[in-house]
Image (spheres, grey):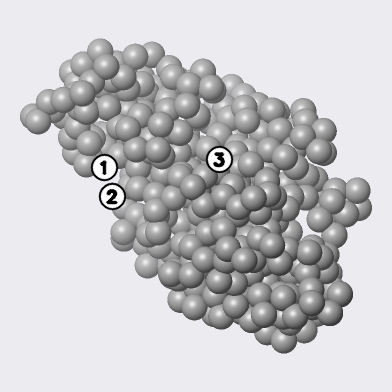
C-alpha cells in the first residue's frame, strides 16, 4: 500500500510525564507512544498495513521545520488525532507564553476537523502533582469547556487498550462520515462558534482581550486597547486593535483603519514607555501583504510574512504594524501573539523593533508639541 494512502494517526501528549502522575514508577507516556506506534503500524487488514502513526518523538527528525511547526503541521494534516489528556499544556515555545504545544495541537486539529479529534482522559485533578502553571490551568479550562473528555482511564493497565479501541472507533467513524464532511464549516463548534455568534463590537472586544491576556495582565497600560510590554529589555507601548471579520469587509476593516495616524494622541501613555506605539492588530481571518501595505498607506516598507501573520515596518517614519492572522478563538489568538514573540527572538528582530519604537516615540512626541 502506498504511503499516501495510509490513515495518518497522531498521538499527542507530554513526552516526559508518567501515569499516574504521583507514581515515580508510573507508565512513561513517551515509552507508551513509541510502543503504540510500533503496534498500530504493524496492524494488518486483509494483508495490508493501513496505519501511519506520528508522535512527538519524530519532530526532532524533521530538518525543514522546527519541532513546534512540525507538531502543528501533523495536527493539521492527520486523519485521526488522539490526545492523551493529563492536564499538562506542554512546552510553551522558546520564549514561553500562555499556550502550550499540547493545547495548540488540540485546538488546531479541532478547528480543522472537529470530527477527527478524540481524547483519552488520564487527567488526575486530585493528584498532588497536578499540572498547575498558568498555561496548564488555561489548557484544563479549554478542555473542560469543550466537553470532549472521553472515557476516564482508571489505571495504566487499561490505557493501551483504550487507545487502540479509540483508534478503531475513529477509523469506523471517519469511514462512515469522511474527513471532508468532518472538516466542513470549521467555525461551527467550540470557541470559534462562540465568537462567530458575537456582533462586530463584541468580537472586537473579545479579540483584544485575548491579545492582552497573551501579553500579560501585569503589563497593562491605562487604556483597554493598549499595554506596555517588555521587548529586548525595553518597555514598548503596544496599541491593540482587531478586525472582527475578513479584511475584505470594509465595515470590519474600518474599525482599525490606519491606526498610526492617531499616534500623536498617545503621548500620555508613552510617558511610561521607552518606545512606541507599535500596532498589534488581531485579524479574524487571513491577511495578505497587500492588505497590510494598504493599512500602512504606502507600499515602500519592510513586509515579513510569518507563521503568525504579517509584520510591516517603515524605517523612515518608524511605523510598525503586526497583523495576527486567523484569530477565530481565544487560543488561536493568543497562540498567534506567542508565535510573533517567538519569531522576534528567533530572527533576532527584537533589537530592530525596539530601535524603531524609540524613534517613533521621538517623532510622535515632536508631532504632539506642534499639534
**Is residue 245 found left or right of 171 in the rendered image?**
right
The residue labelled by disc 2 is 57
Front-lying residue, 328 or 212: 212
In the rendered image, the residue lying farthest to the right is: 250
Marks 1 and 3 sit apart, C-alpha to C-alpha, by 22 Å
Nearer to us: label 2 or label 3 = 3
Marks 1 and 2 sit apart, C-alpha to C-alpha, by 8 Å
Q: Are marks 1 and 2 in contact (CB under 8 Å)?
A: yes
Residue 42 in sight in this render: no
Marks 2 and 3 sit apart, C-alpha to C-alpha, by 24 Å
Residue at point 66% right, 61% down?
269
Few, some or many C-alpha atoms within 10 Å of disc 2 (few <14, some 14-19, many ≥20)? some
Q: Which numbered disc flags the more N-terminal residue, 1 or 3?
A: 1
The residue labelled by disc 3 is 331
| 140 relative to 224, above or below | above
Image coords of residue 241 (percent x, y): 73, 53
Helix, strand or loop at mark 1? loop
Image coords of residue 234 (percent x, y): 48, 70
Amino acid at each position: 500500500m502506498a504511503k499516501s494512502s495510509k490513515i495518518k494517526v497522531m498521538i499527542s501528549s507530554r513526552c516526559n510525564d508518567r501515569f499516574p502522575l504521583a507514581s515515580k514508577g508510573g507508565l512513561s507516556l513517551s515509552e507508551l507512544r513509541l510502543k503504540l506506534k510500533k503496534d498500530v503500524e504493524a496492524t494488518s487488514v486483509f494483508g495490508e498495513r493501513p496505519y501511519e502513526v506520528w508522535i512527538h518523538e519524530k519532530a526532532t527528525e524533521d530538518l525543514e521545520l522546527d519541532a513546534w511547526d512540525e507538531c502543528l503541521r501533523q495536527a493539521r494534516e492527520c486523519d485521526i488525532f488522539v490526545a492523551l489528556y493529563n492536564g499538562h499544556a506542554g512546552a510553551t515555545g522558546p520564549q514561553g507564553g500562555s499556550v502550550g504545544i499540547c493545547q495548540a495541537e488540540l485546538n488546531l486539529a479541532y478547528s480543522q476537523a472537529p470530527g477527527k479529534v478524540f481524547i483519552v482522559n488520564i487527567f488526575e485533578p486530585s493528584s498532588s502533582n497536578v499540572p498547575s502553571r498558568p498555561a496548564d490551568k488555561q489548557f484544563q479550562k479549554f478542555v473542560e469547556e469543550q466537553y470532549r473528555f472521553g472515557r476516564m482511564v482508571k489505571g495504566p493497565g487499561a490505557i493501551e487498550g483504550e487507545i487502540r479501541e479509540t483508534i478503531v472507533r475513529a477509523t469506523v467513524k471517519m469511514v462512515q462520515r469522511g474527513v471532508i464532511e468532518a472538516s466542513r464549516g470549521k467555525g461551527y463548534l467550540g470557541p470559534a462558534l462562540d465568537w462567530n455568534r458575537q456582533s462586530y463590537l463584541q468580537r472586537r472586544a473579545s479579540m483584544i482581550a485575548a491579545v492582552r491576556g497573551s501579553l500579560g495582565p501585569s503589563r497593562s497600560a491605562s487604556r483597554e486597547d493598549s499595554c506596555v510590554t517588555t521587548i529586548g529589555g525595553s518597555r514598548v507601548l503596544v496599541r491593540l486593535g482587531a478586525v472582527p471579520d475578513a479584511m475584505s469587509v470594509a465595515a470590519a476593516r474600518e474599525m482599525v483603519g490606519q491606526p498610526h495616524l492617531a499616534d500623536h494622541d498617545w503621548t500620555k501613555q508613552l510617558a511610561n514607555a521607552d518606545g512606541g506605539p507599535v500596532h498589534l492588530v488581531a485579524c479574524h481571518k487571513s491577511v495578505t501583504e497587500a492588505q497590510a501595505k494598504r493599512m500602512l498607506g504606502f507600499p515602500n516598507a519592510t513586509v515579513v510574512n510569518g507563521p503568525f501573520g504579517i509584520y510591516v515596518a517603515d524605517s523612515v517614519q518608524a511605523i510598525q504594524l503586526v497583523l495576527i492572522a486567523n484569530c477565530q478563538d481565544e487560543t488561536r489568538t493568543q497562540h498567534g501573539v506567542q508565535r510573533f514573540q517567538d519569531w522576534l527572538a528567533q530572527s533576532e528582530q527584537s533589537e530592530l523593533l525596539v530601535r524603531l519604537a524609540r524613534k517613533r516615540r521621538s517623532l510622535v512626541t515632536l508631532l504632539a508639541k506642534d499639534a
